[in-house]
Amino acid sequence: MTGAALALVYFSAIYFVPEVLSIISKTFSVIIPFIIAALLSLLMEPAVNFLSAGTRMSRPLAVGLSMLAIFGGAGLIVVLAVFRLVKELIDLSVTLPQYVKPVHEFILYSFEKSKVFYFSLPPEISGRINESLGTITGALSNFTRSLAHFLLGFASALPEAILGIIVAIIATYFFSRDHSLLVKLWLGAVPEPWGEKVLKVVREVGHAFLSYVRAQAVLVSLTTVQAIVGLYFLGVDYALTVGLLIGFFDILPVFGPATIIIPWAVWSFISGNVAFGVKLIILYLIIWVVRQSLEARVVAANLGLHPLAVLAVMYIGLRLMGVPGLIFGPILLITAQAAHKALKGS
């Protein structure tokens, strides 16, 4: 019996579990616009209730005005940022040759010096250098190929992403407009007490997830503002463009602000601008220290969790899943906490 049970567990882990995970992944990718719409409607609910109850406005009109205010405000901010970004990119394209010229001269100088050094080396050392260069060239070739595949996949997925955004916006309106009707239909279809319990769990998880997103938005915004202000103080001509780029990389946990600042500082040291390189390193250290010291506290404050618990799940997630665990660890924690809170309250 024990052997049969172990065999069943083994075959389930090898064949059944991967299939189930694949089905869940495909299902999630299909319903993700509706999940986003449900979360957005939950986010808009206080504003919709205020307009419909406080001003006696019809709910469809209140939903429409709330969506216009939220999406319109976010769109206006994005448009203004894009206009400023385009202006700085145009200016950068005009002055780019003067930045590229020193790089080109440095590469030529380094190449000439390396040729003299290379031909003076013993054959066995030069052979190893050739092998190392071949390895580096192969790695760069693989990276270029992977980057090309990524860009091709991104471009091919863009129409589908735009369609998903449109579906999410339309679904947000109907989720919010027919909120009461959808709740009644659910309670009528699912027997008590499970219908109400599931609704409580969904509400708690939704509120907790939005709180987590708000916490991450605060941290990314803080990093972006620090980068822009710091670069302005350093006299960088395109502080807004570079600061927004640093903020974008801060969203990606695999990369982070170091992806921009550290190579920039290294190049400053190589090109002889040591003082500017030191200032960039100091700016990065400030951004890193502020982020590390506030991340657990901000997430905990928005979710009502102890900072130690948030820090623990982030560390465990990092050890078990790598860098993605820094995101999924807190998400799993808030989901478990919200579900426990909802079920306990019921």
Image (cartoon, rainbow, N blue to C red):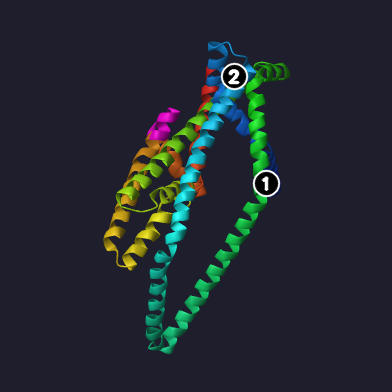
Numbered range of the magenta stretch: 298-307
Q: Is residue 342 above or below residue 15?
A: above
**Residue nearest the viewer, comparing 188 with 229:** 229
What is the number of the mark on residue 62? 2
Question: Residue 203's x, y, as percent?
Answer: 57, 24
Q: Nearer the viewer, residue 98 or 177?
A: 98
From the viewer's perspective, is 183 left or right of 135?
Answer: right
Which residue is depicted at the point 37% across and 84% down?
A: 117
Q: Point out which mark residue 319 bears.
A: none
> Which residue is the site of mark 1?
159
Residue nearer the viewer, 327 or 113: 113
What is the number of callouts on the image?
A: 2
Q: Residue 318: x and y, percent? A: 47, 47
Residue at (63, 38) in percent of width and height: 165
Looking at the rendered structure, the kind of residue marked 2 is Ala
Residue 297's quadrant in the figure?
A: top left
Q: Secondary structure at mark 1?
A: helix
Mark earlier in primary sequence (2, 1): 2
The kind of residue on which mark 1 rests is Pro
Image spot of residue 109 (x, y percent): 38, 78
Report helix, strand or loop for mark 2. Answer: helix
Query: How many residues crowd around disc 1 within 10 Å: few (fewer than 14), some, or many (20 or more)?
Result: few
- Residue at (70% x, 42% y) in the render: 23
